[in-house]
Amino acid sequence: MEAMAKVTMPVMVVFLSLFQGGRVDSFGIPEFLEFGECAPVKPQENLNFERYSGIWFNIEMVPNEYVNILSCAMANYTWEGDLMVVEERGLSDAGMKMRQFSSMYPTEGQPGVLTVNAEGVPSAPYVVVDTDYEHYSCVHSCLAMMGFRAAFSWVFSRHPTLDPAMLQLCHDRLNEWNVDTSTMVPMTQGKECPYTNKLDSLLAYTQRVQSKAKAREMAQHKGKASTTAGDMQTLTDPRREEEVKGEQTEARQQEQPQWDVREVTQSTQEQVLQDRRTDAQHAEEEEAALSGCDGRSRREVGLLVPLLAVGLILMASSTPLT
């Protein structure tokens, strides 16, 4: 019983709000309710709410007891950054001019889905199934409760008329999600509507809104591309830095042996000179030691010393440099 009460309470709240708004028939059941669950309709991917802004004319719809505007319906959508403000104008069933305001905000956890807030009615989802922003929009909304559902669909156009092929396209898109479009009825639009005298200015307004939105979208894409390029540069810079370090190391390795050769060559030359000085000193010492010998011996020794020195010099000069 407690579980049933938890389920019944929100449903009663919905019915009471409808009853107070005069949207319930004499038996207390809204005419638009039917058995079944809501179709698992998903929104168009990457929906740009700013590009969706501007004037939309109601071309076709499922009869909806929430709405008092029954002909010449047109709505101005304005994206405020985190909220869509909607001003709808048209005629009532008595031909009186009507104006209604509502707001829609992004639904948490459901990208591309908006939630409608309007006075006197429960909140409802607003799902743009398909749109090209410039010509048509196919919209669906559904609330399910205790085995009943309240499902609505609309076809909108940027002009008071819509190409039949685009109208059929919307039907096809909705049918793909098992949405019944057979109950949809056309909305009266045309020369008898209040907007006729200012239609050109309305279309021009929408075109300006579209142009600005498209320009911002392109700028955002360009910014993302630049950011991506910058990220790639950031990724490649360390690689290039490693390549430069490797090239520098290789260059140093190539230069290092050359410096070693010069150092070894210089050391070898110094060693040869030192050896020559040492040999000369040794020769002088030997000559002094032999100074007491006879002349022949001294002459032989005298000839031997230069020959020995020359031999040592030749040997030193012929030593390969390593």
Image: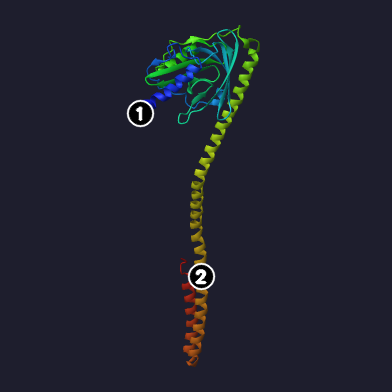
Residue 64 in the image, given as x and y percentages of width and height: 48, 14
- Nearest the camera: 3 or 84? 3
Q: Are marks 2 and 1 in contact (CB under 8 Å)?
A: no
Q: Say what secondary structure mark 1 lies in.
A: helix
Instruction: Please give the residue where the numbered disc 1 appears in the rendered image.
Output: 2
Residue 20 in the image, given as x and y percentages of width and height: 50, 17
Amino acid identity at mark 2? Ser
Label 1: how many Cα within 10 Å (few below 14, some 14–19, many 20+)? few
Amino acid identity at mark 1? Glu
Q: Residue at x 48, y 20 (%)?
A: 17
**Among the 4 quarters of the image, the one containing residue 7:** top left
Instruction: Please give the residue where the numbered disc 2 appears in the rendered image.
Output: 267
Q: Residue at x 52, y 62 (%)?
A: 259
Which badge, 2 or 1, is on the more N-terminal residue?
1
> Residue reaching furthest left?
1
- Is residue 103 rendered to the left or right of residue 181? right
Residue 201 in the image, given as x and y percentages of width and height: 65, 16
Residue 239 in the image, given as x and y percentages of width and height: 48, 46
- Nearest the camera: 184 or 21? 21
Q: Is residue 46 above or below residue 175?
A: below
How far separated are the C-alphas under marks 2 and 1? 103 Å
Number of marks in the image? 2
Q: Residue at x 64, y 17 (%)?
A: 204
The type of colouring in the image is: rainbow
